[in-house]
Image (spheres, grey):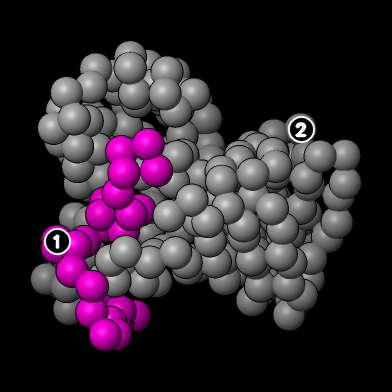
C-alpha cells in the first residue's frame, strides 16, 4: 500500500520535468512557450521547476501547445489500450499551490483515467475549497466541461452569470469562457469533473 501511494505521488512530481523535456525537444525557449500559450515566463519557470502545480486549465493549454495529450504528464507510457483501470489507491492528489506560495488555486484534483493515452475526455475528482467571493480564481481552456456535484455546494461563475450547484446537480458549459468555482456553505465541495478537449 505504501509503495503504491508513493508511486501515485510521483506522477504529480514529474509534471514540471516532463513539460521541460518536451519544450527542449521542440527547441523552444521558456519565453517562446509562454508567449505562444499566453502565460507568464515566471509561471512556466515555476511549473518546470516543480515549485507550483498547474491548474487543470493551464495544463491543458500547455499540452495543446506542445502537441501532446494531457495524459502525457501523468503516466509512464503513452500507449492506447482497449480499456484501462485506475484503482482507488492509485489516484494521486495535486497540490493547491498556484503562482508562488501566495496564490491558492482553490481546489485539488485527482486524475481518474491517467493510464489511457490519446483520449478526448479527461475525468477528475475535484475538491473545491471554501473561499471568499473576492478570492475566486478564474480559468479558461479550449473545449467543454461537465461537472456533477457529489458532496457539498459550489458557486459557479461564468461571465456575468452565477449559479449555485448542490449535491446531485450537474452542469455543462463552454470552458473557453472565463469561469470560476468556490465551495459555499460549511464544508468543501467534492465533484466529478469531465473536461473535453475538442482541439485534439
Q: Is residue 177 left or right of residue 85?
A: right
In this rendering, the answer to whether 176 lies above or below 148 is above
Mark 2 crowd level (few <14, some 14–19, many ≥20, 10 Å Cα)? few
Mark 1, mark 2: which one is toward the viewer? Answer: 1
The first of marks 1 and 2 along the sequence is 1
Asked whether 34 or 127 is in front, the reply is 34
Q: Position of residue 156 (x, y in %)?
A: 76, 53
Asked whether 132 or 33 is in front, the reply is 33
Q: Position of residue 19 (x, y in %)?
A: 24, 38
Q: Position of residue 67 (x, y in %)?
A: 31, 44
Q: Is residue 42 visible?
A: no
Residue shown at the point (78%, 71%) measured from the top left: 166
> Which residue lies under the disc numbered 2?
134
Residue shown at the point (71%, 65%) measured from the top left: 172
- Magenta span: predominant SS is loop
Q: Toward which corner of the image does residue 164 lie, by quadrant?
A: bottom right
The stretch in magenta equals: 64-90
Q: Does the magenta stretch include residue 2?
A: no
Q: Position of residue 3 (x, y in %)?
A: 11, 71
Residue shown at the point (46%, 58%) measured from the top left: 109
Mark seen at residue 190: none
Mark 1 crowd level (few <14, some 14–19, many ≥20, 10 Å Cα)? few
In this rendering, the answer to whether 42 lies above or below 180 is above
Q: Can residue 183 be seen in this view?
A: yes
Q: Toward which corner of the image does residue 33 lie, by quadrant?
A: top left
Q: Does the magenta stretch include residue 85?
A: yes
Mark seen at residue 76: 1
SS under mark 2: helix
Amino acid at each position: 500500500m505504501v509503495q503504491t501511494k508513493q508511486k501515485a505521488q510521483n506522477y504529480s512530481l514529474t509534471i514540471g520535468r516532463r513539460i521541460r523535456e518536451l519544450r527542449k525537444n521542440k527547441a523552444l525557449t521558456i519565453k517562446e512557450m509562454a508567449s505562444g500559450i499566453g502565460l507568464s515566463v515566471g509561471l512556466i519557470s515555476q511549473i518546470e521547476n516543480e515549485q507550483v502545480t498547474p491548474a487543470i486549465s493551464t495544463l491543458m493549454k500547455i499540452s495543446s501547445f506542445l502537441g501532446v495529450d494531457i495524459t502525457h504528464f501523468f503516466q509512464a507510457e503513452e500507449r492506447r489500450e482497449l480499456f484501462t483501470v485506475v484503482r482507488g489507491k492509485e489516484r494521486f492528489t495535486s497540490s493547491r499551490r498556484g503562482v508562488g506560495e501566495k496564490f491558492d488555486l482553490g481546489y485539488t484534483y485527482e486524475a481518474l483515467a491517467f493510464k489511457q493515452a490519446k483520449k478526448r475526455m479527461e475525468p477528475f475528482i475535484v475538491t473545491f475549497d471554501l473561499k471568499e467571493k473576492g478570492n475566486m480564481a478564474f480559468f479558461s481552456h479550449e473545449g467543454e466541461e461537465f461537472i456533477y456535484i457529489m458532496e457539498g455546494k459550489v458557486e459557479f461563475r461564468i461571465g456575468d452569470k452565477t449559479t449555485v450547484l448542490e449535491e446531485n446537480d450537474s452542469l455543462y458549459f463552454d470552458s473557453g469562457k472565463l469561469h470560476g468555482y468556490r465551495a459555499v456553505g460549511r464544508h468543501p465541495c467534492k465533484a466529478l469533473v469531465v473536461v473535453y478537449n475538442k482541439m485534439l
